[in-house]
Image: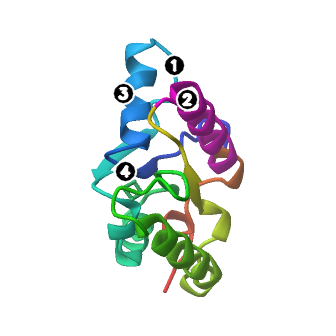
Amino acid sequence: MNDFEPTVIAFVCNWCTYTAADLAGTSRLSYPPNVRLVRVMCTGMVDPQYVLKALLEGADGVLVSGCHPGDCHYINGNYKARRRIKLLKALLPQFGFAPQRLRLTWIGASDGIEFAHVMQELVDQVRELGPSEAKTKMVL
Ligand code: FES
């Protein structure tokens, strides 16, 4: 278990968290290479199927991260995402996954330090959980 390196898929909003990731990079902040960013235009477009597909195909954790409440460029996309993620977290055990494998955060465009901190914290948390249930036992 000590050698386990988790893979985390992060669906990040183009306008905020993706820009924060860019800022973290240009600021030479380091964060774990375990995170694979998927840029989306808004967290409101992250279909729950994307999260389930990522988990079923081997991701050990999934992050959805976007603009702070009130800052969404599409007015209420992040509110829709918040409702969907809450519901999905409640449903994940029925698919065989620990709900802690899914996380929602708000990281603004100027929060490069926060981005690096959240990525480190998330990877540490998923490492504690161990490999995804999709790899270790039958799910669905
Ligand atoms: S535009 Fe960033 S969460 Fe909607």
Q: Which residue is mark 2?
A: 116
Foreground: 66 or 3? 66
**Closer to the N terminus: mark 3 or mark 1?**
3
Asked whether the residues under the numbered discs 4 and 2 touch, taking CB atoms below 8 Å apart as contact, a structural biologist would say: no
| Callout 4 secondary element | strand
CA distance for labels 4 and 2:
16 Å
Asked whether the residues under the numbered discs 3 and 1 touch, taking CB atoms below 8 Å apart as contact, a structural biologist would say: no
**Closer to the N terminus: mark 2 or mark 3?**
3
Q: Residues within 10 Å of mark 3 (few under 14, many from 20)?
A: some
Q: Which residue is mark 1?
A: 30
CA distance for labels 4 and 3:
12 Å
**Closer to the N terminus: mark 4 or mark 2?**
4
**Closer to the N terminus: mark 4 or mark 3?**
4
Q: Which residue is mark 4?
A: 13
Mark 4 vs ligand 1: CB below 8 Å: yes
Q: Which disc number belongs to residue 20? A: none
Q: Is residue 116 magenta?
A: yes
The residues colored magenta run 110-126
